Amino acid sequence: MKKGLIHNPRKWVVTVIVSTFFLFFWINGPLENVIAIQIESETNKELVKPVIIGKKKEKKKFGTIGDMETSGEGFSMILDDEDSSAGYNMIAFDEEMITGTAYGQDLLANAKKFYPADNAQFYLRQTTDFYYAEIQTRTEYLFYFQSKGISDNIKGYSGPINVGLYISEDGYLVDLVHVSSFETRSYMEKIAQTHYYDQFSDLRMNKSHEVDAISGATISSRAMALTTTDLVDKLYPFPLTDLVDQPGIQKFEAKASLNWRWIPHISIIFILFLYAFQKKLRKSKLFVLLTSLASVLFIGFYLNESFTYVTFIHPFIGTSLSSFMGIYALFVLLGAIWGKNTYCKYICPYGNVQRLQLKIWKGASQKFFLPNKWIKRIRFFIAIMLITGILAGMRNLSHLEPFPYFFGLEVQTLWFFLFAVAGLLLNWLYPMIWCRLLCPTGSVLDTLDAITTKKFKK
């Protein structure tokens, strides 16, 4: 008698485990949020925090100088006279000294770069803990802050995103700019081509705001909003209360979430997975072709929503899962458990590009140069090395995937040439070479399939 669903206890156990795992982190956020630990970058912190020279004083309530550091990047701050009767210590700014810092120079240069007003005057300022730029024009008085080294605990797809905030003296967030990051270029360009940054113009600093995340760059757009919120939170109360004339700044929050369009998007993906689960329509060449085209055109070029093995480890590297990606990931995992890796076989856009290519012309189709046993071992080794490296902090390794370069049409990069040109040429010689030999996502999903379907040797 053929086994039914109820006679697969191992599959049910794994289903409950992975479903609980993703529901937990979808609701509670990444591991850092769950255990309430913020990981700071010590390297950047040294550049952000000014160095003060002088006698140590007790920390007081109103902008006093706290504990001092005695080493730094060849710059210093000078305390006022020790006998000052003021309730706080004023900092004497020396323009030559403070502009001599690497972090300060970078911040001031970026303030000018993203606010290219002809009549503006820029001054680098610093408090006990932060650098900022003061901007004066005929009509505006602004302050510019950067998140680098301050809000590095917030992660995008490939690590922290350095954003710049222009804040007016009357308590408005005037503008948000993307300064630098290791995010994939095509995703950041996609954000720039939308209304995303416009949503941060002229926001009152004493209330919460909802903005639209960008489909196809959900993780990056959400991370920038979270970074903005975190940066303002860390700048409060000082120096913001000294610079901005508006009460209630601590109430500021920017939340980025996908609008209702993500629901029909995930519904279409769900339909593709339903097709992959049943057997009757899979035998039709027409439906196979339509599914492949839908995968390539809709998930690949239209959504350009990269799904990879990195999605599974995002909760452990501080990156939040969106509702769209959380459900998408659950579909993929359930497909690996119950459908013998339906994602790789039927849904993956890059895999379908290779299949469509071979339908047009099979090419040489040489016998693979390695036995299947070694093919699986090499692919598994690549997956383990990449996952270990990313968990160890080498977030750039997450870019070693064809998806963003091929479907983002990043023709100016070497990776586009490797995946779109060299990769597809090799596909004619050795069919599905990426999927069979190199793909870490396929290795993870095939391993999950093996755990739930194969009997262990006694």
Image (cartoon, rainbow, N blue to C red):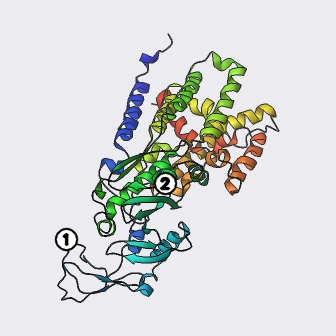
| Residue 296 located left or right of residue 142 | right
Residue 301 appears left or right of 69: right
Q: Please name which of the two marks, 2 or 1, marks the residue nearer to the observer.
A: 1
Question: Is 280 or 262 nearer to us in this picture?
Answer: 262
Q: Report the residue at 82% width, 38% height from top.
A: 363
In the displayed structure, 7 sits above or below 231; it is above
Disc 2 residue crowd, few under 14, some 14–19, many 20+, Cα 10 Å: many
- What element does badge 2 sit on? helix
Q: Nearer the viewer, residue 47 or 425?
A: 47
In the picture, the disc for residue 390 is 2
Q: Is residue 372 visible?
A: no
| Residue 172 place in picture, x, y as percent | 39, 59
**Marks 2 and 1, how far apart in space?**
41 Å
Which residue is drawn at the image coordinates 22% and 83% (left, top)?
56
Q: Position of residue 380 (x, y in %)?
A: 56, 44
Q: Mark yes or no: residue 51 visible.
A: yes
Q: Is residue 338 above or below residue 138?
A: above
Q: Secondary structure at mark 1?
A: loop
Residue at the top extreme of this rendering: 1
Where residue 323 sits, quadrant-wise, is: top left
Q: Check residue 61 in the rendering and tell me which mark sits there, or answer none.
A: 1
